[in-house]
Image (spheres, coloured by chain):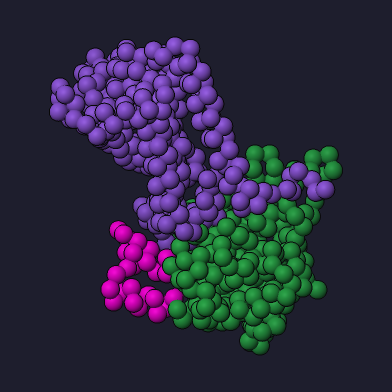
Amino acid sequence: MTQVTVKRLWKQFGGQVVLENVNLHVDDHEFVTIVGASGCGKTTFLRMLLGVEAPSRGEFLIDGQALPSEPGPDRGIVFQRYSLFPHLSVRQNLLLGLELRGSPLLGRLFGARRRRALERADELLDAVGLQGAADKYPQQLSGGMQQRLSIAQSVICEPKILLLDEPFGALDPGITADMHTLIIKLWNMNKMTIFMVTHDLQESFELGTRLLVFDKVRVDPQAPDAFGATITFNIPLKGQRAPIERLRGADPSPAQPDSADGP
Amino acid sequence: MRRLINQQPGRGGALALRALPFIVLIAAYLFCSHARLTANPGDKLLPAPATIAAAIHRFALEEDERSGEYLLWNDTGASLERLLAALAVSALIGIVLGVGIGVLPYVRVTLAPLLAVVSLIPPLAILPILFIVVGLGETAKITLIIIGVAPVIARDLAMRAQELPGEQIIKAQTLGASSWQLVLRVVLPQMWPRLVDSLRLTLGSAWLFLIAAEAIASTEGLGYRIFLVRRYLAMDVILPYVAWITLLAFTMDGVLRLLRAKAFPWAKAGGS
């Protein structure tokens, strides 16, 4: 069970308020999609979940515990790009998470443990359709294949939460549909909670079980930095491919956002 | 007519063009040498090819009358030993300092300013200090090269390590990497080809420091020999020695380039 609770969260950089009074409750195995105009704090929110940024005020809790102040294996991340290791082949990229976990000193596995890890990696390679490219280096892959690898690389560590920062933003529209199918498949296989920042409104409705819209409620034209964005819409969605119970079970969260709950 | 920037020489043409400057240089030498020797058969400045060949034969293929050694090979061995020892130590210092500074903020804050200062000290200016402190032996010469080369490699690698995309470092942490594992599996492997690049770039200054040190205090070595025979205006020895040093440096550069291409196929080659 993974529950994410955000209470009265503020984030500011110097005098610039990025996020203000964000309240949120996300249940286990939700697929949260986040949309909003550029510069409205979506990515900052994601980076706080990741542990790279700390909240200025308020609470950010995972399962009732304060968020660790650095990235860890319980929260996977897929960036738009640059998150693969160029010196490792596709299979080694995938293996890395298992090796790091299994061998604190050398970061490498040997013998039977390595064989078991390789089996795991090859299973997942099949699942994401990269079995034919196992021995290539990341820069020899197309953008879509790179993102599939990056997702698989995170999923192999079985994170409780998977964060996706515009993962398909740089891909061709044709490939994006395949990626949607893949991410839903992995989401159901691993029972993780997903937070996905996206620019694509249609994508956010199609994939999500909950859609968050970040926007500024207050704007002072004289001081554009004085007020931050917050969650203006928190919309429970059916989630096109999600189990139907989620629709009924999508009860309003305990910590209600102070603004509208969607249409 | 296509633009000049879009015009490429063909294969044969490229080969001829590559050879052309060398041929011109050699022809110019032969012409000038001939002209001077015609005017004054005793001229030592631009010796004739035959004189040079005789000198090469004397230094490379005949035992020295006094020491019974083949001087060219003896000098080459002594110089390469110093150079390779110094480069090995410099590479080690460079990678340890560079990765430390690039990855760990505490190390960066503590050592980066010192390294910046040290790398700006002209190494030749502290050569006297080295001679005073560690004596005139091998240590001083090797240390001089290390002082000249190691800070440059360390700074270069520190910058390269900091250039690694932040996404990669964060991703590795979400895969459970500790600081040590991050260095071992993510940073170091990506620094090896950069280290080779760095060594290639510093090879020139390493030779410079080697020859300077040998010229001042040594009893054997390529730099020692050149400065020794200078007293007799022995251009017939100096010229082949310089060519030989150049060839050695060129070969080392080529070996490093091949090593990089073979050992790190994932890293795109930078420069030629």
Which one is in front, B88 or A218? B88
In this rendering, position of residue B156 left or right of residue B240: right
Q: Is residue B269 above or below residue B31?
A: below
Which one is in front, B131 or A80? B131
Write down the colour of chain A: green
| Residue A41 lies in quadrant | bottom right
In this rendering, position of residue A122 left or right of residue A25: left
Which one is in front, B236 or B129? B236
Predominant secondary structure, magenta span: helix
Q: Is residue A159 visible?
A: no
> Residue B247 at what x, y percent from top left?
40, 37
Q: Is residue B83 above or below residue A35?
A: above
Q: Is residue B136 visible?
A: yes
From this viewpoint, which residue is outermost toward the right?
Answer: A221
Write down the colour of chain B: purple
Residue A101 shown in magenta: yes
> Residue A156 at what x, y percent from top left?
47, 73
Say which residue appears at 65% left-offset and 45% top-offset. Answer: A12
> Residue A119 at what x, y percent from top left?
40, 80
Q: How many marks?
A: 0
- Residue stretch in magenta: A95-121
Residue A235 shown in magenta: no
> Residue A118 at what x, y percent from top left?
39, 76
| Residue A25 lies in quadrant | bottom right
Say which residue appears at 67% left-offset and 48% top-offset. Answer: B9
| Residue B40 lies in quadrant | top left
Say which residue appears at 54% left-offset and 70% top-offset. Answer: A149
Q: Is residue B269 above or below residue B206?
A: below
In this rendering, position of residue B242 left or right of residue A241: left
Say which residue appears at 73% left-offset and 75% top-offset. Answer: A174
Which one is in front, A256 or A228? A228
